[in-house]
Image (cartoon, rainbow, N blue to C red):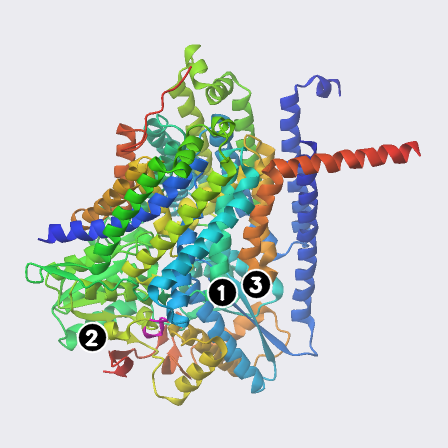
């Protein structure tokens, strides 16, 4: 019974990673850059909801929409100001700028909201599910997170495969130059990707803070890195891969804490990642890139 | 003089770098000796040198080998702990500070090189961002692992545990050398500015000689075109591993400097986590990938910057972040580069006009 | 390419200029501090993280010290000297902490309140011992923080807290089956845990589960909670800070696990977490020298001032720092410090009197110090009842 319980909490943790990883993977797939500031956009999303709900008494669902709008604007602005001027140069340069943006967001939040922890009021008010006479409890947040994760994944997949804008994204991701020649607005497509990724970050922020109700300026950074690992795990650039990677990461993390060592669980998670990448060098669902001579 | 002219361009450029380090050293020494150096600056000398070594060593991996490594701090961590452990254990056996420190540095270099080989064999089979994430993973594993190590010594010899100090089961006379999260306390303070500068010069000589050797050219050919390199019979794995191991080993040396500068050594996310690895990468990218002199300058500037911004109090790190973004845009963005070129041309034109007039 | 070179050259030149200017300034102010005899000031430095993930603690220390300094200055200062306070950020990194210390030395600091965190404190203590600067750490609880003669502390040491907690639980028969959830990557937490576990054996307490987490892995505690639940723990000992504890309480509640919770001084502040559902903390017991809800005049006044100035309820770190400034004042008055003394002379004067003074502060009445730097004061056991701390 406890095994099932560990499994469920693992899925719960994993689905939060998965939603963050979806944003990571979208941006990576199209812009070919590791957006290290993604985790901090999540934190901003969390703070927006916190301020709206606790200080201004806005309805939580309206607050979520406000947060998504804020993060979308923030994401597009960051892209325009900090990343776009560097397009076409070394991907490392953009990576470093992303780190600069990450520091900037953290320190701005620190100045505005202070360093002390804010307890986040859960936006989700689905009751806990009790099974087997209370021996097994599945929290409402877990249910919502998993469902949200599946819906987002499905919608994103449909969007990318079926809509014109989505197909433009695929084209840009495949070959930026060729896409431009075919009349696709590359800059617009990349901006759209950042907008979607950042809106997803807002959702992820709210779910993260609902499941783990503590909010600090650094809330986003570690889950951000873990989600990055999850995205690579599943095959970076692949939307279903991000979800599978995230959930697997959560499960492995919790099971290793439970059965091997709670002290060394980080090491174990990263160890599994290394083994997976050695066996499948492009992640679980990653495409094998054929090398052309 | 004639020799200087016939010298090849690379060697000349290297000489300038060495000269720059030596001149900087002399100037700083003059300030120190005449007592004109503030305590803050004096305290920063060894850390700055540590970061310079880290930056040039990572530049070997990123710039020359052409692979992105996000786990450089892990090798620094290995070197730091190995050397600190040695110094602490041998504190009474080897009286001569300098001798003990030199051995400690060698131990740091060797242990970090071993870690480099261990990590390098599996990692170097991967490519691009996947390689980056695996190095990040290794860095985190090293840090996590060291945080769980307990090591003690008593009359019966060494005791080791992964749980806690009680688990060591030591006699009453035992002393704990590594105490889990608290790490190693009481490392003798041996790092001096002079030693640090000598180590920088050694690192630069090693890297520059490697780059200009047959091995270095093989490594760079792998970076530029792996398939072509392989087809002319270059052993990819071997050369990649050589560069990676040397890079790791130099990071270990920097770790030894770090460990012997502070009386406490803990593996925190701040000093040996991915944050530090990324920080070193920032030095490398800002200074110019593959450009050793740039790494040296960038490491010095970016280490001093947050300290010089202390006057800004709460806004310190915010300004630091903004400066970092701006410097990246200024150094890398095509628009800025064009703008700079235009300005340059204009200045030249003006000067010409002035001369003519 | 040429421009780039030019840029780096310009930047280097600018840097060197600021560097030298920095030196000049620093030298100048140091001279002022030691040579002015007219305007009497006493310079106290404080170090703690005000950025980074431990910023909460450093900020509290800075704020607490500031309140004490303002009060003392308003009341006429120390022996007629006004206190100047300079707070420096160390990002909770030992190396940065030494930088902060050196910055303060350049400024002319005569006594140090710091550093806030244990790891940094060990590094700075070595530097302060070499310079012979008086060091009083408000909250550096690791044993090694005060390894040198010139170092003292306000808070309890880690071993002290671990042993006291085990004794309290054992002697009052609170529980016999105990689970511990601790931060294995944190000096404070693992230090307390070790001594607690050692003493628990003497007290007949059985530790049924000892689960760790790390700084990189502190959002999800479901496994640790589940293991404690499965092991049948009656009480969960939390030698951790309140930030993580608030998460553990919330997640234990979600998992339907309702044991007793027992913590140390790091847990104080849990009721001050903005928006925290305080019913979750009902019946939590903690051994702390300071409780923000205590009804004595001193605490009430301090909490009111803190609230007014910083809009928050102070935690134990703020109280420790507040006391630290007053302890320095008491020692300085006893030693009869005059203006313009060098840091080394100040240290030589303060160290011998530290063992002679008795201070009534927020974190204890009748605090005294032994020559090794440890304070002697009684921990208060408090229990959270209806959202307020009540003495047990």
Q: Which chain does tag 2 point to?
A: C
Residue C248 locus on image (x, y percent): 25, 63
Asked if residue C274 lies in the magenta stretch, the reply is yes
Read off the residue under disc 3: B313
Q: What secondary structure is the magenta-colored segment mainly?
A: loop
Residue visible at 54% across and 41% down in the picture: A84
Read off the residue under disc 2: C168
Task: Please give left or right for residue B165 compared with residue B31 in the image.
Answer: left
Tag 2, which secondary structure?
A: helix
The residue segment tinted magenta is C271-275
Task: Please give left or right for residue A278 compared with residue A102 in the image.
Answer: left
- Name the residue at the left extreme: A133
Residue visible at 30% across and 33% down in the picture: A283
Q: Can residue A21 be seen?
A: yes
Instruction: Name the disc covering residue A112, or none.
Output: 1
Residue visible at 24% across and 48% down in the picture: B155
Front label number (3 vs 1)? 1
Residue C276 locus on image (x, y percent): 32, 71
Asked whether the residues under the numbered discs 3 and 1 touch, taking CB atoms below 8 Å apart as contact, a structural biologist would say no
From what the image shows, is residue C117 above or below residue C331?
A: above
Tag 3, which secondary structure?
A: helix
Residue A289 locus on image (x, y percent): 36, 24
Q: Gap between marks 1 and 2, in whole Å?
A: 41 Å
- Name the residue at the bottom extreme: C297
Which quarter shows the C terminus of chain B?
A: top right
């Amino acid at each position: 019974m406890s095994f099932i319980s560990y499994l469920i909490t693992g899925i719960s943790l994993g689905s939060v990673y998965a939603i963050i990883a979806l944003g990571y993977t979208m941006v990576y797939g199209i812009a070919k850059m590791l957006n290290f500031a993604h985790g901090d956009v999540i934190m901003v999303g969390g703070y927006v909801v916190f301020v709206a709900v606790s200080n201004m008494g806005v309805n939580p669902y309206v607050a979520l929409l406000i947060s998504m709008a804020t993060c979308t604007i923030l994401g597009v602005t960051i892209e325009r100001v900090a990343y776009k001027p560097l397009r076409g140069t070394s991907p490392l340069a953009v990576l470093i700028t992303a780190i600069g943006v990450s520091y900037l967001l953290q320190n701005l939040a620190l100045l505005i909201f202070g360093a002390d922890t804010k307890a986040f009021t859960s936006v989700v008010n689905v009751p806990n599910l009790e099974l087997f006479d209370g021996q097994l409890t599945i929290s409402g947040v877990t249910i919502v997170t998993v469902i949200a994760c599946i819906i987002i994944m499905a919608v994103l997949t449909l969007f990318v495969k079926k809509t014109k804008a989505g197909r433009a994204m695929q084209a840009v991701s495949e070959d930026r130059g060729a896409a431009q020649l075919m009349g696709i607005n590359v800059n617009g497509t990349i901006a759209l990707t950042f907008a979607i990724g950042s809106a997803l970050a807002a959702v992820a922020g709210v779910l993260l803070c609902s499941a783990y109700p503590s909010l600090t300026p650094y809330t986003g950074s570690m889950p951000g890195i873990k989600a990055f690992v999850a995205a690579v795990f599943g095959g970076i650039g692949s939307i279903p891969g991000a979800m599978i990677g995230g959930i697997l990461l959560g499960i492995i993390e919790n099971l290793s804490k439970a059965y091997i060592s709670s002290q060394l669980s980080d090491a174990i998670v990263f160890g599994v990642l290394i083994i997976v990448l050695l066996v499948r060098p492009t992640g679980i669902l990653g495409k094998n890139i054929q090398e052309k001579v | 003089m004639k020799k200087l002219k016939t010298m090849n361009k690379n060697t000349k450029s290297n000489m300038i770098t060495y000269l720059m380090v030596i001149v900087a050293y002399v100037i700083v020494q003059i300030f120190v000796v005449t007592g004109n150096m503030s305590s803050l600056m004096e305290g920063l000398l060894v850390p700055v040198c540590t970061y310079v070594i880290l930056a040039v060593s990572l530049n070997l991996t990123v710039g020359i080998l052409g692979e992105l490594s996000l786990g450089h701090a892990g090798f620094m961590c290995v070197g730091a702990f190995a050397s600190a452990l040695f110094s602490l254990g041998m504190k009474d056996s080897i009286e001569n500070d300098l001798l003990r420190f030199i051995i400690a540095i060698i131990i740091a270099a060797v242990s970090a090189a071993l870690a480099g080989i261990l990590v390098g064999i599996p990692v170097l089979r991967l490519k691009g961002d996947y390689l980056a994430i695996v190095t990040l993973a290794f860095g985190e594993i090293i840090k996590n692992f060291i945080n769980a190590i307990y090591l003690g010594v008593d009359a019966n010899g060494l005791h080791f545990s992964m749980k806690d100090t009680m688990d060591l089961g030591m006699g009453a006379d035992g002393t704990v050398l590594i105490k889990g999260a608290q790490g190693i306390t009481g490392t003798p303070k041996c790092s001096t500015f002079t030693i640090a500068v000598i180590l920088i010069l050694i690192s630069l000589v090693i890297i520059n000689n490697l780059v200009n050797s047959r091995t270095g050219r093989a490594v760079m050919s792998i970076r530029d075109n792996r398939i072509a390199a392989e087809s002319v019979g270059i052993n990819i794995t071997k050369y990649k591993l050589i560069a990676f191991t040397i890079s790791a080993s130099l990071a270990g040396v920097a770790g030894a400097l770090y460990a012997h500068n502070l009386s406490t050594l803990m593996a925190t996310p701040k000093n040996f986590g991915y944050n530090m690895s990324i920080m070193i990468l920032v030095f490398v990218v800002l200074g110019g990938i593959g450009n050793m002199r740039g790494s040296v300058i960038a490491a010095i500037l970016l280490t001093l910057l947050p300290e010089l911004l202390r006057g800004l109090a709460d806004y310190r790190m915010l300004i630091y972040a903004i400066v970092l973004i701006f410097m990246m845009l200024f150094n890398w963005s095509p628009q800025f580069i064009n703008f700079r070129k235009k300005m340059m041309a204009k200045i030249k034109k003006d000067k010409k006009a002035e001369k003519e007039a | 390419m040429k421009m780039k070179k030019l840029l780096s050259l310009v930047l280097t030149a600018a840097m060197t200029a600021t560097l030298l200017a920095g030196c000049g300034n620093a030298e100048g102010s140091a001279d002022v501090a030691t040579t002015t005899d007219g305007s009497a000031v006493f310079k106290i430095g404080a170090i703690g993280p005000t950025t980074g993930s431990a910023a909460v603690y450093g900020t509290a220390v800075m704020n607490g010290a500031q309140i004490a300094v303002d009060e003392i200055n308003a009341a006429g200062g120390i022996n007629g000297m006004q206190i100047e306070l300079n707070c420096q950020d160390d990002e909770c990194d030992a190396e940065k902490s030494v930088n902060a210390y050196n910055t303060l030395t350049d400024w002319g600091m005569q006594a140090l309140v710091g550093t806030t965190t244990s790891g940094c404190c060990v590094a700075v203590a070595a530097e302060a011992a070499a310079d012979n600067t008086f060091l009083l750490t408000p909250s550096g609880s690791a044993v090694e923080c005060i390894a040198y003669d010139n170092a003292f502390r306000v808070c309890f040491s880690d071993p002290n807290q671990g042993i006291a907690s085990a004794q309290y639980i054992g002697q009052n028969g609170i529980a016999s089956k105990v689970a511990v959830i601790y931060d294995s990557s944190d000096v404070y937490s693992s230090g307390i845990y070790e001594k607690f576990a050692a003493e628990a054996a003497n007290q007949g307490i059985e530790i049924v589960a000892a689960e760790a987490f790390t700084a990189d892995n502190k959002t999800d505690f479901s496994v640790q909670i589940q293991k404690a639940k499965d092991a049948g723990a009656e009480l969960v000992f939390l030698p951790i800070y309140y930030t993580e504890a608030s998460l553990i309480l919330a997640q234990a509640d979600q998992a339907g696990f309702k044991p007793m919770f027992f913590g140390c001084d790091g847990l104080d502040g849990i009721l001050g977490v903005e928006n925290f559902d305080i019913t979750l903390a009902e019946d939590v017991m903690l051994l702390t020298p300071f409780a923000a809800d205590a009804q004595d005049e001193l605490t009430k006044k301090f909490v009111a001032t803190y609230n007014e100035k910083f809009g928050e309820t102070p935690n134990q770190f703020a109280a420790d720092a507040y006391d630290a400034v007053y302890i320095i004042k008491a020692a300085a008055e006893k030693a009869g410090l005059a203006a313009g003394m060098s840091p080394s002379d100040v240290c030589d004067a303060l160290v011998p009197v530290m063992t002679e003074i008795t201070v009534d502060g927020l974190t204890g009445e009748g605090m005294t110090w032994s020559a090794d730097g440890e304070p002697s004061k009684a921990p208060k056991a408090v229990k959270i009842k209806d959202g307020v701390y009540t003495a047990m």
